[in-house]
Every structure is written in C-alpha cells, then in structure tokens.
Image (cartoon, rainbow, N blue to C red):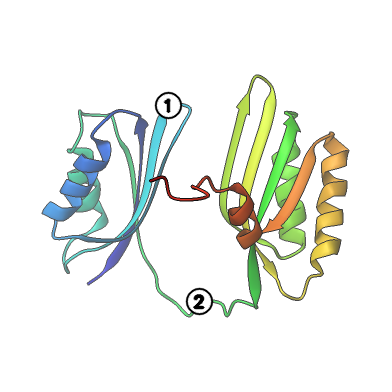
Amino acid sequence: MPAFIVSVTAPDRTGIVAGVTAALRDLGGNITHLNQTVVRGYFTIMLSVDLPEGVDAEAITARVAASAPEGELRVGVMPFREGAPPVPSPADRFVLAILGRDRPGIIARVTAYLAEQGINIEDFTATVVAGDLVLIFGVRVPASLEITHVQRSIETVGREFGITATLQHENIFRATSEVRAVRTLA
C-alpha cells in the first residue's frame, strides 16, 4: 500500500478530526501516525496514511476537503518516500525549557544553536501570554556531546536575551513535572 503524508489546517471547531479521518477511511486508508494541535484558534493535523493502489494525492485532497464546508480546510498531500533513514547516532532525549520576556529572534537563535550542535528537535511548543514567552522543546542530544557543556552553552544563549534556559533529561523532567497521586486515595 502506498503511504501519504496529509496535513490539514483550518479555523478550529469541533468535528474536524472526525471528518478528516472518516474521509481517509472512506478512501480505504489506514492511519499509521498522527499529530494534531491548535495554535491561536487554528487547528492543524498531520497524518501518515496507507492507502490502496490507485488512490492519488488529488483524490485524497478532494475527499478530505469535502469533509468540511467549502474552502474551510487547507489540505496538503505528499507521497511518503521511504528511503534508507540516516543511522542515528546514540542520543538521549532531553527537555529544554525556556522562559522569559518575549523578544524577536529568540526562537531563531535557540534553534540555530541546537542545529549547530547536531541536536535534533523532535517536539516543540511556543506560547506568548502577556509578553511572557514559554518554549518547550523535546530534543535528542547526541551521546558525543558533554551535557554540562550543552547546558552551560544554552544558558549563555539565554542570557543574550535575558531568558532562562533549562535542559533536563526527559526521565528527570517527567519525574519532577508530571502531576500524579503520591498515594492512592481510599
């Protein structure tokens, strides 16, 4: 079965996921990966879907677009090309949290630093509320990098903008940040 990457963006409302996934099901599709979020009132979803032979990008676009009122959905479709994935170097997953007053250029500078170090961004959210910036990155730090050096360097980048940057191993972040019961209530 050929696979496609499908992206949909629209003003948020209830039922978009139901409509999009039903449209793909009606084409004989099987969704294998999905990520969805809402940013400032705009819905976006990205899916990987396996479809029967003969279903092409135009058919997918038309069927998905027809799952909502005309012109509501922006649909993008591209064939998934499975090649030899690059062999990842050994890496651990870390959470990078950045907090402070918002200023232009912070995201560009931080992401440039990560790229220069060979640190891959796997997840990323950014919000600004009342001028306060919160960036949360899920990153893979190559085992070849010294974590204390990376932490000091990212703190230096943060000081350029007057922001706080904290890098924690994902397991430590989860252990200290997840909300869960200390003991079961009787």
* Lateral position of residue 105 relative to residue 68, left or right: right
Q: Which residue is mark 2?
A: 85
Report crowding for label 2: few under 14, some 14 to 19, many 20 or more residues within 10 A (C-alpha).
few
Q: CA–CA distance between discs 2 and 1? A: 35 Å
Amino acid under disc 2? Pro
Q: Is residue 88 above or below residue 138?
A: below
Image point (60%, 56%), residue name: 175
- Image quadrant assignment for residue 57: bottom left
Image point (72%, 74%), residue name: 143
- Image quadrant assignment for residue 125: top right
Q: Nearer the viewer, residue 91 or 20?
A: 91
Q: Position of residue 171 (x, y in %)?
A: 61, 62
Q: Position of residue 22 (x, y in %)?
A: 16, 47
* Lateral position of residue 133 relative to residue 70, left or right: right
Q: Which mark is residue 79?
A: none
Q: Nearer the viewer, residue 60 or 36?
A: 36
- Closer to the eye: label 2 or 1: 1
Q: Which mark is residue 41?
A: 1
Q: Is residue 105 above or below residue 141?
A: above
Image point (50%, 47%), residue name: 180
Q: Position of residue 170 (x, y in %)?
A: 62, 59
